[in-house]
Amino acid sequence: MPGVFVAAIDLGGTKAALALVGKDKSITHRQVLHTSDYLRPEDFVQAISAWLGSVQKELSPLDRIVGVGVGAPSGNRLHGTLDYAPNMPWEGVVPLATLLHEKTGLPCVLDNDANVAAYGEWEFGAAREMDDFIVITLGTGLGSAFICNGRMLYGHQGLAGEAGHMVIVPGGRPCKCGRQGCAETYCSATGFMMTFRELMQEAGREQELVHYFDPKAVEAAAKMGDTIARESFQKTAEWLGLTLANCCVFSNPRLIVLTGGLAGAGKLLLQPLQEVFERNLLRSYKGHVSLTFSALPGQDAALLGAASLVWRSFSSANPEFHEFL
Ligand SMILES: [Zn+2]
């Protein structure tokens, strides 16, 4: 039986993962490109096109690649652009979707990494068949995507869903957005490590900090009973629980899915988080919003999400795609 595939691209500042994704979640023809090897976006697009050409030779004549889905930091769905992505080798506004479409002849959909994570959960993960949910990514930063009434929230400029930049501690930690006390500076993996370092310094244990490079190391210490490691999870849960409860007043979700590096901490984070979250929820929401971690395989979630961008576009009234079905 002929197969139908999407070319999925998980684009980051250092590398880009490429693969074909089938409607059944199958991932094949993987390739990794080093983003920094390509000085101009046109060179990167040329490399994608070359990869697609080699992949097409391996497919049977009846198989079809029906579109390209791209997840990228600072990706703007409405314009198909990368807007001033801070860690990319290309500066300014890059019309990546148009460049890819012109080079490959395939329709291309591009979105930011938090929205792509949400499309992945919607199509393949914890939020299947749901119309109202929020996805929060807890990595270097805190990304968020709001799905309300069965639609992704984009807003006037395509930039809606920046829960990471809600101020939760007035006058608090400086944020890269130029303000102080944003949720991202407390609840992301980066913010979590900052909290841990502060607590270790207060306890006079700064000389031990060389052993702790990432949340995984702190998690291991917490499981061994280290009180400061445990307190770091508790404090982070306080800030994150408040942030999530605040998010609920915008869109009245049924589910919040947590994903990204810090979500790997499991019960250590989820247990205190659930308690703080319920305590801060509006009374009418209490007991009606679930919190869960993403069940999608970490390394493939972004590829599945990027493919979902294209599958979802097929199901919306988008004439650009219909000729490919
Ligand atoms: Zn901020």
Image (tube, rainbow, N blue to C red):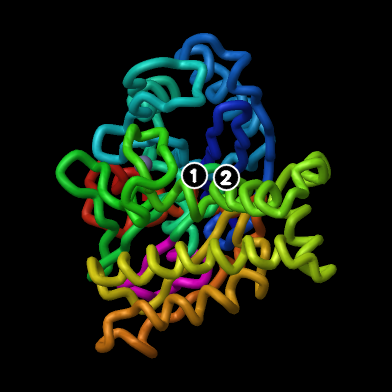
Residue that badge 2 annotates: 190
Residue 131 forms part of the magenta stretch:
yes
Residue sitting farthest toward the top: 39
Q: Main secondary structure of the magenta part?
A: loop
Quadrant containing ligand 1 reads top left
Mark 1–mark 2 Cα distance, whole angstroms, equals 7 Å
Q: Nearer the viewer, mark 1 or mark 2?
A: 2
Q: What amino acid type should be assigned to the residue bearing mark 2?
A: Thr
Residue located at (74% from left, 56% from top): 218
Q: Which sits earlier in the primary sequence, circle 1 or circle 2?
A: 1
Left or right: 314, with 188 as reference point: left
77 and 268: which is toward the camera: 268
**Mark 2 C-beta to ligand 1 under 8 Å:** no
Instruction: Locate residue 133: give its quadrant.
Output: bottom left
Whether pointer 1 and pointer 2 mark residues with C-beta atoms closer than 8 Å, the reply is yes
Disc 2 packing (10 Å; few <14; some 14–19; many ≥20): many
Q: Is residue 127 above or below residue 111?
A: below
What are the residue bounds of the magenta stretch? 122-135
Left or right: 144, with 211 as reference point: left
Residue located at (58% from left, 74% from top): 270
**Mark 1 C-beta to ligand 1 under 8 Å:** no
Residue located at (31% from left, 67% from top): 246
Residue 39 forms part of the magenta stretch:
no
Residue that badge 1 annotates: 141
Q: What amino acid type should be assigned to the residue bearing mark 1?
A: Gly
**Image location of residue 173, percent across then percent down:** 44, 43
Can the viewer see residue 52?
Answer: yes
